[in-house]
Amino acid sequence: MTDQARHPLWAAHSADELLAFLELEQIDRDIYRGVPGIWPSDRTSLYGGEVAALALRAASHTVADDRTPHSLHGYFLRRGDHTKPVIFMVDRDRDGRSLSARRVAAMQGGEVIWEMACSFSVPIDGPEYVQPPAVGLRGPMESPPLAWTWCPILDIHVPPAAGEQRPRPMSVDRAWIRVNVPLPDDPIVHACMHAFASDVTAGFGDLAMDGVPPGGPSIDHALWFHHPSRADDWVVYDCKPAKVGAHRGLYTGTAHDLDGNLVAMVAQEMLLRPPKEE
């Protein structure tokens, strides 16, 4: 059963309505306005993956049609309000023979909430080495759905670590993720929705260190696109901690599709504030 089917608010809307947030209004040259998607009323802030996806969408409107996203690097500067529109201002840094570089500032109330640099590339054939997926991870249908309902348009199944019988509580260090509504055959849309999904995971749930939560607010986020893949097909994110200190944590992760292709790599730093004592 999908997240959409479990929540009456989401089930009451069509796929087009749920994906309408991807359609940006152009209000001037390289300036776009986006309206956040349909979310449960108890959500308190704008989901970071949505801001990243829309910023990438805005940047894509300023590059040639033969170029698709290659990477993005962004900073979460302020908490966004999911009830208000977001203005995206794109700077065209450079257009080379095979790469285009852009910077995007996402703004609400006259303040920048997300700042991103991103790159688009022309597909080029050449020798290839691919990091293989982890061995022993259960597939999406053998993995339990995420225990807490969270996102309207994503199915999220959480496999346990290799050799374990069940996932650890609150751990999303590994997750099979797919968009649960059909997407158009547009590689930019699929890249944007991979960016949307890439902020779901964390890398500290299996660490089990005293005073270190399984995740926290995102500080910065990097994503590299390596293989074209449909975001409405299953992709498994496998994340591992690299460093925890000063109440911050850095993790890296890979995303592979069902055929074993390396779809993307992700790196993210989070605030890891110790849990408040009752």
Image (tube, grey):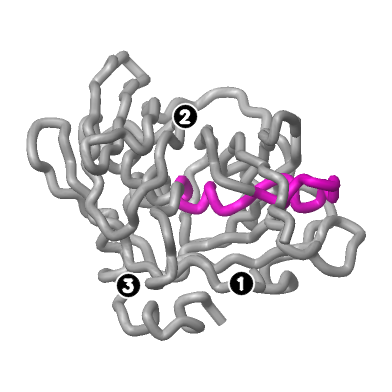
Nearest the viewer among 25 and 106 is: 106
Residue 36: x and y, percent?
Answer: 30, 57
Spatial CA span between label 1 and label 2: 29 Å
Q: Is residue 187 visible?
A: no
Q: Helix, strand or loop at disc 3?
A: helix
Give yes or no for contact between labels 1 and 2 (Cβ–Cβ under 8 Å).
Answer: no
Residue pointed to by mark 2: 73
Specify few, some or many for label 3: CA neighbours under 10 Å numbering under 14, 14-19, or 20 or more: some
Give yes or no for contact between labels 3 and 1 (Cβ–Cβ under 8 Å).
Answer: no
Kind of residue sitting beneath label 2: His
Question: Which marked residue is nearer to the observer: mark 3 or mark 2?
Answer: 2
Residue pointed to by mark 3: 15
Q: Helix, strand or loop at disc 1?
A: loop
Q: Is residue 199 magenta?
A: yes
Kind of residue sitting beneath label 3: Ala
Spatial CA span between label 3 and label 1: 22 Å
Quarter of the picture containing the C terminus is bottom right
Nearest the viewer among 180 and 230 is: 180
Q: Is residue 124 left or right of residue 275?
A: left
- Point 16% across, 35% down: residue: 31
Give yes or no for contact between labels 3 and 2 (Cβ–Cβ under 8 Å).
Answer: no
Kind of residue sitting beneath label 1: Trp
Q: Helix, strand or loop at disc 2?
A: strand
Which of the 4 quarters of the picture holds residue 11? Answer: bottom left
Residue pointed to by mark 1: 148
Q: Is residue 246 visible?
A: yes
143 over 7 or under it: above or below: above
Residue range of the region highlighted in magenta in the rendering:
194-215
